[in-house]
Amino acid sequence: MSVLALAEAPDGRLLVGSSADGAFEWGVGGLRQRVAPEQLWSNQVRAILADADGGVWYGTIQGLSRCLGDTCRRFTAAATASRATTSLRWPAIATARCGSAARWE
Protein backbone atom coordinates (compact mmCIF):
# COMPACT_ATOMS: atom_id res chain seq x y z
CA MET A 1 0.00 0.00 0.00
CA SER A 2 1.26 3.48 -0.88
CA VAL A 3 0.37 6.22 1.61
CA LEU A 4 -0.67 9.56 0.09
CA ALA A 5 -2.07 11.37 3.16
CA LEU A 6 -1.66 11.22 6.95
CA ALA A 7 -3.49 13.08 9.70
CA GLU A 8 -4.32 12.78 13.39
CA ALA A 9 -7.87 13.30 14.64
CA PRO A 10 -8.45 15.28 17.86
CA ASP A 11 -9.38 12.00 19.60
CA GLY A 12 -6.00 10.46 18.69
CA ARG A 13 -7.09 8.32 15.71
CA LEU A 14 -4.47 7.93 12.99
CA LEU A 15 -5.97 8.69 9.58
CA VAL A 16 -4.31 7.29 6.46
CA GLY A 17 -5.13 7.87 2.80
CA SER A 18 -3.85 5.34 0.27
CA SER A 19 -3.18 5.30 -3.45
CA ALA A 20 -5.62 2.47 -4.21
CA ASP A 21 -7.15 1.01 -1.01
CA GLY A 22 -9.25 3.91 0.29
CA ALA A 23 -8.76 5.38 3.74
CA PHE A 24 -8.01 3.83 7.11
CA GLU A 25 -8.74 5.00 10.65
CA TRP A 26 -6.77 3.42 13.52
CA GLY A 27 -7.88 4.15 17.06
CA VAL A 28 -9.03 2.72 20.37
CA GLY A 29 -11.96 1.02 18.63
CA GLY A 30 -9.69 -0.80 16.18
CA LEU A 31 -9.28 -0.42 12.43
CA ARG A 32 -11.91 0.97 10.04
CA GLN A 33 -11.52 1.12 6.27
CA ARG A 34 -13.44 3.61 4.12
CA VAL A 35 -13.86 2.62 0.46
CA ALA A 36 -15.48 3.68 -2.81
CA PRO A 37 -18.21 3.76 -3.90
CA GLU A 38 -20.09 3.32 -0.62
CA GLN A 39 -18.27 6.03 1.36
CA LEU A 40 -15.69 7.71 -0.89
CA TRP A 41 -15.72 8.88 -4.50
CA SER A 42 -12.45 7.07 -5.18
CA ASN A 43 -10.05 4.75 -3.37
CA GLN A 44 -7.18 7.16 -4.15
CA VAL A 45 -7.25 9.45 -1.09
CA ARG A 46 -4.94 12.46 -1.48
CA ALA A 47 -6.03 14.67 1.44
CA ILE A 48 -7.47 14.16 4.94
CA LEU A 49 -8.79 16.68 7.45
CA ALA A 50 -10.31 15.88 10.86
CA ASP A 51 -12.78 18.48 12.12
CA ALA A 52 -13.75 19.53 15.64
CA ASP A 53 -17.04 17.58 15.49
CA GLY A 54 -15.24 14.25 15.11
CA GLY A 55 -15.89 14.09 11.37
CA VAL A 56 -13.21 13.38 8.81
CA TRP A 57 -13.02 14.97 5.35
CA TYR A 58 -11.46 12.83 2.60
CA GLY A 59 -10.24 14.41 -0.62
CA THR A 60 -9.98 11.95 -3.49
CA ILE A 61 -9.11 12.28 -7.16
CA GLN A 62 -12.85 12.13 -7.95
CA GLY A 63 -14.42 14.23 -5.20
CA LEU A 64 -14.83 15.10 -1.55
CA SER A 65 -16.46 13.05 1.26
CA ARG A 66 -17.11 13.72 4.97
CA CYS A 67 -17.55 10.78 7.34
CA LEU A 68 -18.79 10.87 10.93
CA GLY A 69 -19.17 7.48 12.62
CA ASP A 70 -20.88 5.12 10.19
CA THR A 71 -22.33 7.91 8.04
CA CYS A 72 -20.55 9.38 5.03
CA ARG A 73 -21.69 12.19 2.76
CA ARG A 74 -20.19 12.49 -0.70
CA PHE A 75 -20.21 15.98 -2.24
CA THR A 76 -21.12 16.14 -5.91
CA ALA A 77 -19.05 17.70 -8.66
CA ALA A 78 -21.59 20.54 -8.83
CA ALA A 79 -20.63 21.46 -5.24
CA THR A 80 -16.90 21.61 -6.00
CA ALA A 81 -14.86 23.67 -8.43
CA SER A 82 -13.35 20.43 -9.77
CA ARG A 83 -13.77 16.80 -8.76
CA ALA A 84 -10.12 16.23 -7.75
CA THR A 85 -9.30 17.35 -4.20
CA THR A 86 -5.58 17.51 -3.50
CA SER A 87 -5.39 19.38 -0.18
CA LEU A 88 -7.62 20.44 2.70
CA ARG A 89 -7.16 23.03 5.45
CA TRP A 90 -9.31 24.34 8.25
CA PRO A 91 -9.46 28.01 9.23
CA ALA A 92 -12.97 28.78 10.53
CA ILE A 93 -14.42 27.16 7.40
CA ALA A 94 -12.81 24.28 5.52
CA THR A 95 -11.23 25.23 2.23
CA ALA A 96 -10.93 22.48 -0.35
CA ARG A 97 -8.13 22.92 -2.87
CA CYS A 98 -9.60 21.78 -6.16
CA GLY A 99 -7.56 23.66 -8.73
CA SER A 100 -9.36 26.74 -7.44
CA ALA A 101 -10.66 27.24 -3.91
CA ALA A 102 -14.13 26.07 -2.90
CA ARG A 103 -15.49 26.87 0.56
CA TRP A 104 -17.70 24.67 2.73
CA GLU A 105 -19.97 25.88 5.52
Image (cartoon, rainbow, N blue to C red):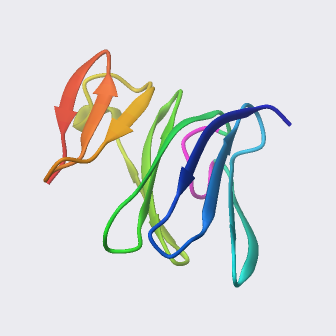
Count the marks: how many?
0
Residues shaded magenta: 37-42
Q: In this image, 13 relative to 78: left or right?
A: right
User: In x, y percent, where is residue 37?
Assistant: 63, 49
Q: Position of residue 19 (x, y in %)?
A: 73, 31
Q: Where is residue 13 in the image (x, y as percent from the top left)?
A: 60, 68
Residue 82, placed above or below residue 1: above
Query: Which residue does the image show at 65% across and 33% down from the upper left?
Result: 44
11 sits left or right of 38 in the view: left
The quarter of the rendered structure image containing the N terminus is top right
Mainly helix, strand or loop, the magenta region? loop
In the rendered image, the residue lying farthest to the right is 1
Q: Where, quadrant-wise, is the C terminus in this rendering? A: bottom left
The stretch drawn in magenta includes residue 14: no
* Horizontal relation, residue 82 to residue 94: left or right: right
Which residue is nearer to you in this view: 45 or 36? 45
Q: Quadrant of residue 70?
A: bottom right
Determine the residue located farthest toward the top in the rendered image.
99
- Write the residue at 50% across / 30% down: 62
Q: In this view, does 46 lie above or below 7?
A: above
Residue 72 screen position, x and y as percent = 48, 64
Instruction: In this rendered view, identify the residue nearer to me: 51 or 77.
Output: 51
